[in-house]
Image (cartoon, rainbow, N blue to C red):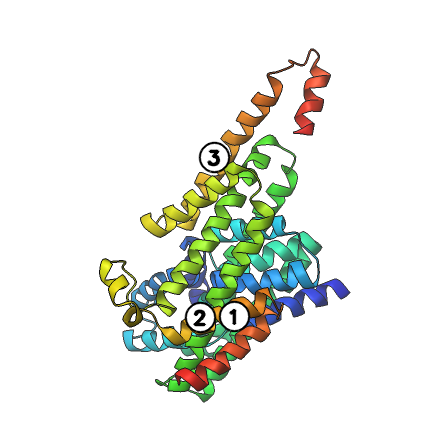
Amino acid sequence: MSHLYIFLMFARIGIFSFGGGYAMLPLIFQSVQDFGVMSAEEFSNLVALSQVTPGAVAVNAATYVGFNYAGFWGALSATIGVALPSFMLIMIVSKFLEKFRESRIVDGVFLGIRPATVGLIAAGAIFIAETSLVNNPPFSMELINHFTQYVNLLPCGIFVCTIILVGKCKISPIKLLIMMGIVGAILCG
Amino acid sequence: MKMLVQLFVAFFKIGLFTFGGGLAMLPLLQGIMVEDKGWMTEEEMVDCVAVSQSMPGVIAVNAATYIGNSKKGVVGALAATIGVILPSFVIIILAVLFLGVIGDNQYINGAFTGIKAASCALILYAAWKLGKQVLRAKMDFAIAFIAFILIIALDVTALWVIIMGAVAGICLRGYRSKKLNRPKTPSTQEEKEKEDKAI
């Protein structure tokens, strides 16, 4: 019974959350509070752990909650629960797109969402830059006067090196992430 | 069968080396799917991002399902999805069993400072590479710029930006076919259909 319970709890989260990862965490927190599965302190540990471990944040959180609540099978139920709505929805959307790919409307839709998505990706990079490259995100005139106080020099250096290494030397993203993780651990640690 | 194993392995790698989820996996996806394997074009990659960002649920699972399905149907989608989930699943269970509470370790924090800065650079580079393929007409640049500003300045969510892009695209498509039809009005139904296809 408890496995079904945790499966449904995470399926609900999977259906009703947009934006993935960090946008899902508040909804997960709400659910674990409502169902009394976990304390607030344990939840903060979950958030910390989901961030330092690889993979999708929502899957990390589901596995963690499920495992704490009902062991291995709980973890499996929660993870399948959070992934299943995504899987089914995308299958339906893909079939729909395949079927109507030739239609003028779908063609028009892609005509517009392709450039919009490029803008979206660039904006995503800016959001990450705000939390990793600068100390004080809100822009002001102060920022220009005390430039070095607001910019984290080391991450900026890593940023520039990564751009050069991926653009000029064509090093793969995986190798670069490992390299820069090690550089960060040595220099920032 | 070989393709299924390849899909699984590719997504396992992506799941293993993505930190932070969502867009952080894009550079890896693009590197493997578009550049290494040649399974997708840049346009298809952008379509995949649009669909997976605008649907509810786990973005990594959305993308894995989308790509897996386009390569090998339901079974492919399943192989890719299990691949992208498995590293998370195993690592979290191991971490809970053996680590307990993650303390404030300065080396881990330092590593994440480095990974985040690198990830930011890789996403920007991916945006530039995809943009080079996708943004062709002036109108494309305008839509991309508006989308960028809407998110950065007005905090509009990805879903709404993509819906607005879709509406703009439908209008643009209608406008373009109208413009093409105007100079010489097709006399027969057959000609009109031919022209529609050409567009």
Which residue is the extreme one toward the right?
B2
The mark closer to the camera, 3 or 1, is: 1
Whether residue B56 is visible: no
The x, y position of residue B155, in whole percent, is: 33, 50
* Distance from the alpha carbon under mark 1 to that under mark 2: 8 Å
Q: Which residue is mark 1?
A: A162
* Left or right of B13, for residue A84: left
The mark closer to the camera, 1 or 2, is: 1
Q: Which residue is mark 2?
A: B117
Can you say which quadrant of the picture contains the N terminus of chain A? bottom left
What's the amino acid at mark 3?
A: Ala
Location of residue B185 with respect to B55 vertically, above or below: above
* Distance from the alpha carbon under mark 3 to that under mark 1: 35 Å
Between A75 and B101, which is closer to the camera in this rendering?
B101
The x, y position of residue A16, in whole percent, is: 41, 53
Location of residue A11 with respect to A160 vertically, above or below: above
